[in-house]
């Protein structure tokens, strides 16, 4: 895969940074002229990934969320990484409506939403702790 452009962003795992993260990634994608709907899909998926890290990754102290994005032709590849507690059962966590915090009125739809708006979604535990959410979207599909 040839990388045409790349960006990295590190933010504190705070809910107020979610909107910033989604805007940065959307602005990064603008150079390949995606449709408004495609940009909305990217923003939604990034929002869900960042929100998951804010809510679930760091139980005691706030940590860091790293977002990497690269463009290869008209495909964006996005990674959202944290160094938090991880997910005990990733397969189960990806099931619709599964939540580890039902008392917090969580819908358990984060991964389902990401998967529905992106072309690919991969969720993996990181060596040393935390999670890596990888997703991609081809801007030649889904809306053109």
Image: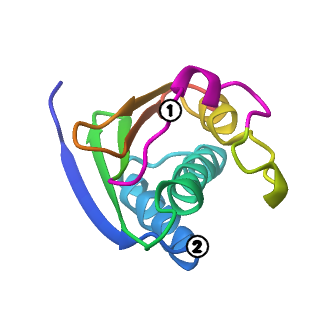
Of 26 and 97, nearer the camera is: 97
Q: Position of residue 89 (x, y in %)?
A: 54, 26
Tell me which segment is drawn in magenta. Answer: 83-98
Quarter containing the C terminus: top right
Asked if the stretch drawn in magenta spans residue 92, the answer is yes
Of 74 and 94, nearer the camera is: 94
Quarter containing the N terminus: top left
Residue 53 appearing in the image: yes
For the stretch drawn in magenta, what is the main secondary structure? loop
20 relative to 37 in the view: left or right = left
Asked if the stretch drawn in magenta spans residue 58, the answer is no
Q: Which mark is residue 23?
A: none
85 relative to 36 in the view: left or right = left
- Which residue carries the number 2 mark? 15
Residue 119 appearing in the image: no
In three-dimensional space, the C-alpha distance between marks 2 and 1, rounded to whole angstroms, equals 23 Å
- Which residue carries the number 1 mark? 88
138 relative to 54 in the view: left or right = left
């Amino acid at each position: 895969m040839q990388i045409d452009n790349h960006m990295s962003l590190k933010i504190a795992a705070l809910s107020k940074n979610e909107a910033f993260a989604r805007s940065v990634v959307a602005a990064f994608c603008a150079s390949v002229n995606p449709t408004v709907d495609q940009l909305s899909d990217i923003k939604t998926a990034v929002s869900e990934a960042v929100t998951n890290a804010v809510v679930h990754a760091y139980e005691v102290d706030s940590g860091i969320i790293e977002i990497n994005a690269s463009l290869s032709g008209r495909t964006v590849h996005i990674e959202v990484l944290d160094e938090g507690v991880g997910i005990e059962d990733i397969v189960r966590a990806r099931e619709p409506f599964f939540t580890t915090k039902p008392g917090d009125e969580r819908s358990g739809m984060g991964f389902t939403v990401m998967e529905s708006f992106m072309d690919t979604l991969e969720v993996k535990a990181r060596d040393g702790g935390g999670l890596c959410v990888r997703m991609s979207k081809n801007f030649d599909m889904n809306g053109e």
